Amino acid sequence: MIEGYLGRESVIVGGEVLLHISTDAPLFRLRFYRLGQDLAHVGESGTYRGTLHTPPAHPDRIPGLASPADDWNWPPVSLPVPEDWQPGIYLVEFIECGGPGPDGGGNPPLLDAEHLEGHAREFFVVRPRVPGGHSRILYKKSAFTRHAYNRSDRPGLERAVSLYDHPVHRTGGEGTLRGHKVSFHRPGGVIDLAYWDAPFIAWLERNGYPVEYCTDLDLHEDPALLSSYDLLLSVGHDEYWSVAMRTHAERFVREGGNIAFLSANTCWWRVHPTDGNTAFVSDTDHHVGDEYPYSPATDQWWTPEPDGVGNPENSLTGVSFRNGGMWPATQWPGDRPRAGYTVQHAGHWIYEGTGLRDGSDGGTPDRLGSGTPLIGYECDGAAYAYDAYGTAHATGEDGTPDSFLILGIYVLEPVHEDFHHFKWGHWNGPVREAAISSPRAATMGIHTAGGTVFTAGTTDWSVVCGHEQDPAVVRVTRNLLDRLRHRTPLPG
C-alpha cells in the first residue's frame, strides 16, 4: 500500500516539488511523466525509506473515517524540477520497493495514456520562469473543484470523505468562516485529469497548439498572471472559484483578454482559501440524508444577498448551471442526450468550415455534436426566448450580458430532478429563479466585454474534441483557438 499528496500542485521550472508519502513498504521511489500527445516518461527518483502514516480522525468522530478538512501532515520529500522540463502537467507515480522478487517489486511497467486514472499517483503543473514565453494560451487546471470531490480513497479502503461525502461544516465565528472545509493536503489519486484534461491536452499538442498551465491557486494568488496571455482556457468541470480568481479574470477580459469556457457548472460556488492557501471553506447546501441543514448557502454566486453572493456567474460566463442541469450519476457520468446543439447563426466565424446550417434557408437546422455525449454530464444555460423565426435569444433576465449570442441550444427535456439519487447528492440540479419561464437548456454562445468570452455550456466539450468524436466540434475548437489566441487591441 502506498499513497500520497502534493505540497502544492504547481511549481516553477527549476523549483522544488514536495511529495508527502505514506506506505507500508520498506522503500519507495517516484516515477515522473509529462502529459502531452503521449504520456512521456521523463525521469525517476532514487529510493526513500518508507513509513506508514495515519490520517487525522474525522472531526465529527465518525468511526473509521478520516478528516477531509484537516492537513494530514505527512512528512515531505523534496525534489528539484529539472531546468529542461517543458511547461505542462506532470504525473508522479508512487512505487513500492523492497518487496520479494529479483527487483524488489519496484519496477512495474510504465503507465500509458490509457491508464492515467488510479491511485498511488498525483499530478502537478510545471510553469515557465517567464510567463507567456512559450505560449500566449494559458490552460487553467480546475484544482479547487478536484479537491472538493476528492474522497481520499485508496485500493481496499473507501474513506468517502470530501465536501460531498461526510463533509465537515463549521458554524463560523471567533475568526473562523462559516461553511464546509476541505484540505488540499490529503491523498486521492487521479480521476478528473484522466477524463477531461488528458484527451484534450493530447489533442492540443497533436494539432500544434502550445499552451502554458496554471492552477486555480495560481490565478487566485497572482493578480498579474493573466497579463502575459491572450487566451485563458477553462476545461471540464470548473465549479469552485474564489473572489480573486473571478476579479482577475473579469479584469483580463475588460483589458482585451479572451476566455474560452470549455466547461460547465462553472463558477457555481465561491470559495475562501485558508490555512496558508492549503485548504478552502465554502458555505454550500449539501445535504445530510434527505435534509439540507446548511441553507441558505451564502457562497452561491448567483443568489441575491444576504442569502448568497449576489454576483451572478452569467455576467462573466454568459451562462449558469441554474438554467442548465445534470444527469443521474449513480454510474458516473450517467446517461446523456446525444442529439447535440441545434445550430444558430451558422454564418458566424465559429462555424467556418463546418458546413453546418441553421435552417435560415427554410430547411431543418443541423446539430453540432449529434451522436456524441456532448451535452452533459453537467451543462449550463442562459434564460432565453424565441423570436418569430424560431431563433433563441438570451433575455438577460438572469444576468447574461446583452451582447451574448446563442450559437447552439439544446432544450433539456427532461431534466432529471430525482436529486437524492445523484452520486454526489446535492440539490443544485433543480434550483433556479421562479420568475424565469424558459425551459432549461444547454447553451453554447459568445459575448464581448473588451475581450471575447466563449462558453461551450457543457463539461464534456474537451472529451468529444479530444477524442475527435465529431469533426464539426473539432473544427469549431480550431476556429476558436485560432481566433482568440491573439487578443484584438482595444480601440484607442
Image (cartoon, helix red, strand yellow):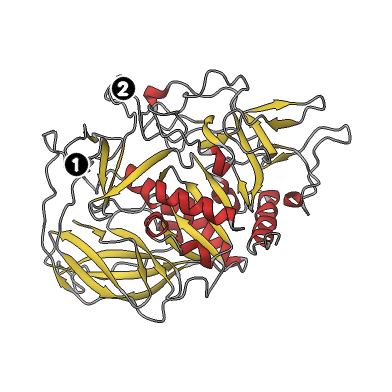
Query: Which corner quadrant of the image does residue 3 belong to?
Result: bottom left
Residue drawn at x 45%, y 71% as measured from the top left: 87
Q: Which mark is residue 2?
A: none
The percent coordinates of residue 481 (x first, y second) are 64, 59
Task: Give the number of marks.
Answer: 2
Furthest residue to the bottom? 84
Q: Is residue 425 left or right of residue 97?
A: right
Quadrant location of the N terminus in the rendered image: bottom left
Disc 2 on helix, strand or loop? loop
Give the vertical position of 484 relative to 129 (above or below).
above
The kind of residue on which mark 2 rests is Tyr
The percent coordinates of residue 397 (x first, y second) are 60, 28
Query: In front here: 201 or 8?
Result: 8
Q: What's the CA distance linking mark 1 and mark 2?
A: 25 Å
Q: Which residue is mark 2?
A: 292
Disc 1 on helix, strand or loop? loop
Q: Is residue 461 left or right of residue 479?
A: left
Quick check: marks 1 and 2 in contact, CB under 8 Å? no
The percent coordinates of residue 485 (x first, y second) are 63, 63
Query: Which corner quadrant of the image does residue 8 belong to?
Result: bottom left
Q: Is residue 480 left or right of residue 138?
A: right
Query: In front here: 408 or 104?
Result: 408
Q: Which residue is mark 1?
A: 175
Give the vertical position of 122 relative to 372 (above or below).
below
Give the vertical position of 325 relative to 89 (above or below).
above
Query: In front here: 441 or 303?
Result: 303
The kind of residue on which mark 1 rests is Gly
Q: Is residue 25 left or right of residue 294?
A: left
Label 1 or label 2, whichever comes before in sequence order: 1
Q: Dot 1: within a 10 Å radius of its alpha carbon, few (fewer than 14), some, or many (20 or more) residues? A: few
Query: Which corner quadrant of the image does residue 216 belong to?
Result: bottom left
